[in-house]
Image: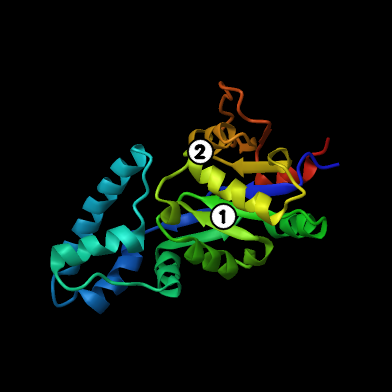
Amino acid sequence: MRPFSILVFDLFETLVENEYMDFNLGLKPLWEAHYKDKCSFEEIKAYGEELFVHMTKLHRQGLEFPFVKDELPFYAEKFGGEPVNMSIEEEAAFLLRCNKARIFSGLPEMLEAFSKEGIPMCVLSNSGFRAGALQIMLDDLGIGKYFEKVWSSADYGRVKPDAGFFETAVSEILKMHPDKTRADILFTGDTYGSDITGAHNAGLRAAWINRKNGSDEKGFAAYQIKDVTELLKLTD
């Protein structure tokens, strides 16, 4: 018997692996469409690097820097014009341009197996891109159909390990599945500080994808695995 009946996953480096991330591949079409007559690409690229440093500082404070809501207005303030108001589809297109991601080997088969067992699955991700854009990315990778719900820190405003971010997801999950309890949920992620500590602080059991043989010094990981597909091996 499975030691869980609901699964919640981190996204990046848990379900999908980034082959590369180059923000400028998304920024250049944005510049061509909205800022070409206001600045050079080198100028907007340099400003994007400044904003990345700003985002990093916010993350250290536990805050997110949502791309559409917060970052795009900075470009308008810096170079002129109205802030670009992207639809979810346009935001997803930007994300897909600058993030080249692939799913881990064996993942579709694992998701299909859990789906056939009737195990609900969701995603809780730290990302500057809204949940709708992440969903489109998952659809593009062919696995979006397996997830009941995607939550992004871009919509919440704070990043994991914030317990409130986890609680937002847990509350919705238990409303969708009133016959389940918090103890039925297993969270799986690869980053100890944000994923495993955050899940523990929210009262969830966690499976840690511990690829580098790190030490579970705090004892927060209920399970340690090398790859997400090892969840298939977990039984009581």
Residue at horizontal 33%, vertical 61%?
A: 69
Which of these two is toward me, 156 or 152?
Answer: 156
Q: Quadrant of residue 108?
A: bottom right
Residue at horizontal 63%, vertical 30%?
A: 221
Q: Quadrant of residue 145?
A: bottom right
Residue 36 drawn above or below residue 207? below
28 sits left or right of 233 in the view: left
- Disc 1 is placed on an element classified as strand
**Where does label 1 land, which residue?**
16
Three-letter amino acid code at the position of disc 1: Val
Quarter of the rendering occupied by the N terminus: top right
Residue 172 at x, y percent in the picture:
61, 53
Residue 1 drawn above or below residue 172? above
Residue 230 at x, y percent in the picture:
72, 43
Three-letter amino acid code at the position of disc 2: Ala
Mark 2, Cα crowd under 10 Å, few <14 / some 14-19 / many 20+, is some
Q: For the residues carrying marks 1 and 2, which lies nearer the camera in this image?
A: 2
Q: Is residue 184 visible?
A: yes
**Where does label 2 land, which residue?**
163
Which of these two is toward me, 4 or 51?
Answer: 4
Residue at horizontal 45%, vertical 61%?
A: 130
